[in-house]
Image (cartoon, rainbow, N blue to C red):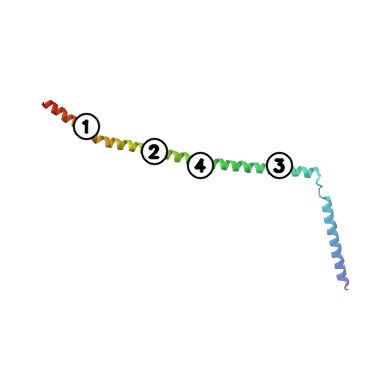
C-alpha cells in the first residue's frame, strides 16, 4: 500500500470522526422542551398564528356580509321593479276602464242633449 494513500485515508477517517463529534455536540446543545426561552418563542408563534386566524375569519365574515348585502340589494331592486310593474298595470287597467266608459258617457250625454232638444220643441 502506498503511504500517500494511507495518510489520505487516515485524514478522511479523522475528518469524519470530527464531523460526527460536532453533530453530537450540536444535538446536545439544542434547547430542551422545558427551556423557558423555547416555551416563550413557541407561545409567541402561537399568538401570531391565532391573530392571523382571527384576521382571516374577520375578512371572511366581512366578505360574506358584503355578499349578503349585495343579494339583499338585488332583491330590493327586483321587488321595486315588481311594484313598479304592478302600478303600471293598475294604471293601464284604469285607463282601459276609462277608455271603455268614455263612449258610453258620450252616448249618454248625446242622448240627454237630444232628449232636451225634443222636450224644448214640444
Q: Which residue is mark 1?
A: 108
Q: Which residue is mark 3?
A: 47
Q: Which mark is residue 86?
A: 2
Compute the Cα span from label 1 to label 4: 55 Å
Q: Which residue is mark 4?
A: 71
Q: Could you tell me which secondary element the residue under label 3 belongs to?
A: helix
**In this view, the mark in front (2 or 1):** 1
Residue located at (42% from left, 40% from top): 82
Compute the Cα span from label 4 to label 2: 22 Å
Label 4, residues with CA under 10 Å away: few <14, some 14-19, many ≥20 = few
Residue located at (66% from left, 43% from top): 53
Q: Could you tell me which secondary element the residue under label 1 belongs to?
A: helix
Q: Could you tell me which secondary element the residue under label 4 belongs to?
A: helix
Q: Name which of mark 4 and mark 2 comes first in the sequence.
A: 4
Q: Could you tell me which secondary element the residue under label 2 belongs to?
A: helix
Compute the Cα span from label 2 to label 1: 33 Å
Compute the Cα span from label 3 to label 4: 36 Å
Label 1, residues with CA under 10 Å away: few <14, some 14-19, many ≥20 = few
Residue located at (85% from left, 59% from top): 18
Amino acid at each position: 500500500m502506498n503511504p500517500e494513500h494511507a495518510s489520505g485515508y487516515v485524514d478522511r477517517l479523522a475528518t469524519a470522526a470530527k464531523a460526527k463529534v460536532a453533530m453530537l455536540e450540536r444535538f446536545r446543545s439544542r434547547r430542551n422542551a422545558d427551556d423557558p426561552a423555547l416555551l416563550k418563542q413557541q407561545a409567541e408563534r402561537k399568538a401570531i398564528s391565532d391573530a392571523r386566524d382571527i384576521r382571516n375569519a374577520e375578512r371572511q365574515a366581512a366578505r360574506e356580509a358584503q355578499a349578503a348585502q349585495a343579494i339583499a340589494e338585488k332583491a330590493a331592486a327586483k321587488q321595486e321593479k315588481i311594484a313598479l310593474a304592478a302600478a303600471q298595470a293598475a294604471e293601464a287597467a284604469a285607463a282601459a276602464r276609462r277608455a271603455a266608459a268614455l263612449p258610453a258617457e258620450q252616448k249618454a250625454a248625446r242622448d240627454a242633449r237630444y232628449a232636451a232638444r225634443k222636450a224644448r220643441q214640444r
